[in-house]
């Protein structure tokens, strides 16, 4: 099943700028981003049902713990009954652990001088073990109306090696458990929106900036470390004196994003993007704003549906 991928989005304006931590020439922000599988994330309650396979119970328990840790879904019905949950998660697991054996050569010291410095080495052949664990999980969520809103296949593989005189770094059970937890985290990230704290660097390039504005611009960049509000007000004034400069437009977008004005930030980044080109920080900003705006819209829609 193809995921309902939500594009990156976001925006912000200088007006109403709130205090935001700045480190070096960066602004630190916290934003909410949408789950890749939108319709699954719209569910209010969820039951983790049967996960078939030898290690299915362990995988199901790991998924339950991962989802419970977020507090996002109302988990219902345990593993035996979906109860009145909006959706049921179920699936199957195939797993296996296999040991194989090989030999490798290793040099060891066989003679030392009076100062215990090695003066003669000899090559030995030693026996070693390679353990490979595989875990493949197929999981899906069926909504109360029968619609499949999430489907994913998650194959994982772990390998460890050890040789005679050493102990195995992990048991087979520990390897399977670690992979079950990794799958659970992946499922959680697929269907639960995330809140991230991130830092974006102010653009410092003065290329094509009128010479009288170069020093004031650099002063404003340094000011972002001490007084972000005043620095952003300075960029606004400078934009009037040197309009349509890529760095000023981008920095105004970052000021707006830091203020929480996602639509304003989107507008500034869109103005900067043609000047900075594809795969630039402005294009990343556009995607980030679009994503954050989509997350806000999804939260509002979910709240409406659950009323």
Image (cartoon, rainbow, N blue to C red):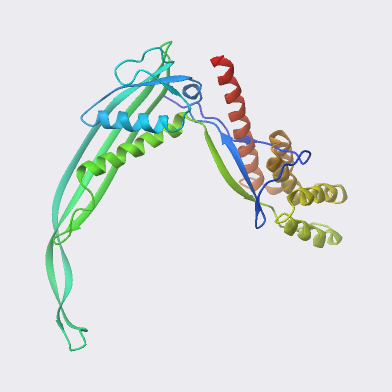
Q: Which quadrant would residue 81 be assigned to in this image?
A: top left
Q: Position of residue 193 (x, y in %)?
A: 51, 31
Would residue 182 be found to the left or right of residue 86 on screen? Answer: left
Extreme-top residue of the structure: 145
Position of 299 with respect to 52 (left or right) is: right
**Quarter of the image that includes the N terminus:** top left
Percent across and percent down for residue 271 are: 74, 41
Left or right: residue 91 versus residue 218 is left
The percent position of residue 237, horizontal first and vertical second, equals: 85, 48
Q: Measuring 82% from the left and 46% from the top, which residue is drawn there?
A: 236
Q: Quadrant of the C terminus?
A: top right
Residue that appears at 38% across and 28% down: 152
Left or right of 218, for residue 40: left
Question: Can you name the residue that lies furthest to the bottom here?
Answer: 114
The image shows a total of numbered marks equal to 0
Using the rendered view, name the quadrant where residue 142 is placed.
Answer: top left
Looking at the image, which residue is at 70% across and 56% down?
225
Q: Nearer the viewer, residue 147 or 2?
A: 147
Task: Examine the rendered structure and indicate whether residue 140 appears above or below residue 227.
Answer: above
Of residues 74 and 116, the one drawn nearer to the viewer in this rendering: 74
Foreground: 307 or 238? 307
Residue 85: quadrant of the picture: top left
Question: What x and y, as percent, mark residue 202?
Answer: 68, 52
Residue occupying the point 73% across, 50% down: 228
């Amino acid at each position: 099943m193809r995921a309902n991928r939500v594009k990156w989005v976001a925006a912000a304006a200088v007006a109403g700028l709130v205090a935001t931590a700045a480190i070096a020439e960066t602004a630190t922000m916290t934003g909410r981003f949408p789950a890749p599988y939108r319709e699954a994330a719209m569910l209010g309650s969820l039951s983790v049902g049967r996960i078939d396979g030898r290690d299915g119970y362990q995988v199901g328990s790991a998924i339950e713990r991962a989802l419970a840790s977020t507090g996002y879904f109302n988990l219902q019905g345990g593993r035996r009954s979906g109860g009145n949950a909006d959706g049921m998660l179920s699936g199957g697991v195939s797993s296996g652990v296999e040991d194989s054996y090989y030999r490798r050569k290793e040099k060891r010291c066989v003679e030392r001088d009076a100062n215990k410095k090695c003066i003669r080495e000899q090559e030995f052949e030693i026996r070693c073990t390679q353990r490979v664990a595989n875990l493949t999980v197929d999981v899906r969520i069926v909504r109360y109306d029968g619609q499949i809103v999430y489907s994913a296949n998650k194959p994982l593989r772990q390998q460890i090696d050890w040789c005679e005189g050493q102990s195995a770094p992990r048991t087979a059970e520990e390897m399977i458990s670690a992979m079950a937890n990794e799958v659970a985290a992946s499922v959680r990230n697929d269907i639960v929106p995330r809140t991230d704290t991130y830092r974006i660097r102010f653009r410092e390039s003065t290329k094509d900036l009128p010479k009288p504005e170069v020093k004031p611009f650099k002063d404003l960049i340094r000011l972002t470390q001490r007084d972000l509000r005043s620095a952003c007000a300075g960029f606004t004034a400078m934009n009037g004196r040197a309009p349509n400069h890529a760095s000023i437009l981008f920095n105004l977008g970052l000021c707006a994003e830091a203020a929480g004005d996602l639509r304003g930030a989107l507008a500034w980044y869109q103005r900067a993007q043609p000047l900075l080109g594809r795969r630039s920080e402005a294009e990343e900003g556009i995607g980030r704003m679009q994503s954050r705006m989509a997350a806000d819209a999804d939260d509002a829609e979910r709240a409406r549906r659950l009323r």
